[in-house]
Image (cartoon, helix red, strand yellow):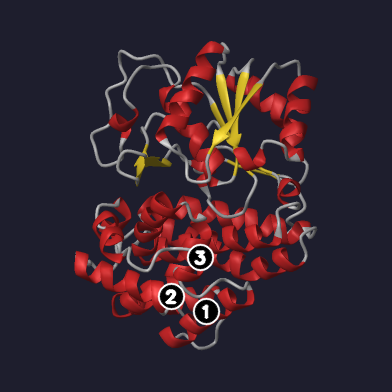
Amino acid sequence: MNLLEAQDWTFPIPIAYGPGRLKEIGRMCSTTGMTRPLIVTDRGSRDLPFIADLGHYLQESGLTSDIYAQISPNPRDQEIAAGQAMFRHGGHDGIIAIGGGSGMDGGKAIALLATNDLDLWSFEYEKPSPDMKDQAPFPPLICIPTTAGTGAETEGTSMLTEVGRMMKFCVWHPQLKPAFALLDPEITTALPRNLTAWTGCDAMIHAIEAYCVPAFHPLCDGIALEGLGLVNRWLLTAVDEPANLQARGGMLVGSCLGGIAFLKGLGMVHAISHMVGASYDTHHGLTNAVVLPSVLRFNAAAIEEKIPPMAGAMGLDDKSFDAFYKAVCNILDTLEIPKTLVDIGVPTDCAAAIAEKALQDSAATTNPRQASVAEFQMVIEDALHNGR
């Protein structure tokens, strides 16, 4: 595969891939009808070069833009309300969501509320979707990932923290879809080593958890295996050679595929990680990576038939669970991922509270082995103190 050539894909939405394609943002805005986009990103990205480049390319195309950058690493509901107000007061007609998962989640959630006065949590994933027939259409939305991890660029779903309960929930509406996903590996070359590793683990875990969801979905299963293969091939190179565009491109595509695959669902890793992140503001990809081994051991008997295809995607000759588990742990060790949740600052006495919250996460329902609160607590205790 040549990861240095521009490619255009149409599934599941229009995707523009290739080094340097951020320069085409003006054309994409014009295609969607945007004339005054609001750029939404996270606080950590506000002063990074790709934000300045994006503004420059928009200006060159005759477009006026503003930036809303008050999105936390674990986006909060009140930040979305402030973004909605900026969209309206600035007379904006579209949103460019750029950043890692938090920046894109923030942008997508603001798009949900930009043109209506509905309550944010009426869009919660487990509730019936609001009837939009008497509401203005959602504004056009373009998503630009700046990390290779979250895979959030092809869907309108957002993970947000409800501050009142300090729990994460997914918000969405089936009518909100990005008009374009723009995948430019040049944007990701300046990502620090640790964030390259943590977000890359997120992409790997999306592929693993999506593939292990027991539902029959051959489209997502094939995409998950291809994503896992790409991440396995390119992650360590991207970490060790940050300017390697082939590696950065392979990771960006692998991440995108993982995000598409988990339309099928996720599992216990994400159910736990979402609530740990909401409660203790840990990095999502890092938390996933720390929790993964404990969940793999818990799920082992339930994913027995899933192991050989995943081992094959990773190029392993031995297709046993033990070999697959060892290969995953070797990746985590090479990337210097901490071994336990305690090592990343999670309190030792949180297991019972996190278990109660995690069981309410939508990802818990698609875990291949259904778990009680007591079993969730057992896995969390294991991740807190033993890890891998």
Is 35 on the left-hand or right-hand side of 276? right
Disc 2 is placed on an element classified as helix
Q: Are marks 1 and 3 in contact (CB under 8 Å)?
A: no
The three-letter code of the residue at mark 1 reads: Cys
Tag 2–tag 1 contact (CB < 8 Å):
yes
Disc 2 residue type?
Pro
- Which numbered marker is on residue 102? none
Q: Which residue is mark 1?
A: 329
Residue located beneath label 3 in the image: 344
For the residues labelled 3 and 2, say whether their Cβ atoms are less than 8 Å apart.
no
Q: Nearer the viewer, residue 227 or 281?
A: 281
Is 277 on the left-hand or right-hand side of 64?
Answer: left
User: Of the residues shown, which amino acid type is indicated by label 3?
Assistant: Ile
Closest to the camera, between mark 1 and mark 3, is 3
Residue 129 against residue 155 in the figure, above or below: above
- Residue 293's tag is 2
Q: Is residue 215 visible?
A: no
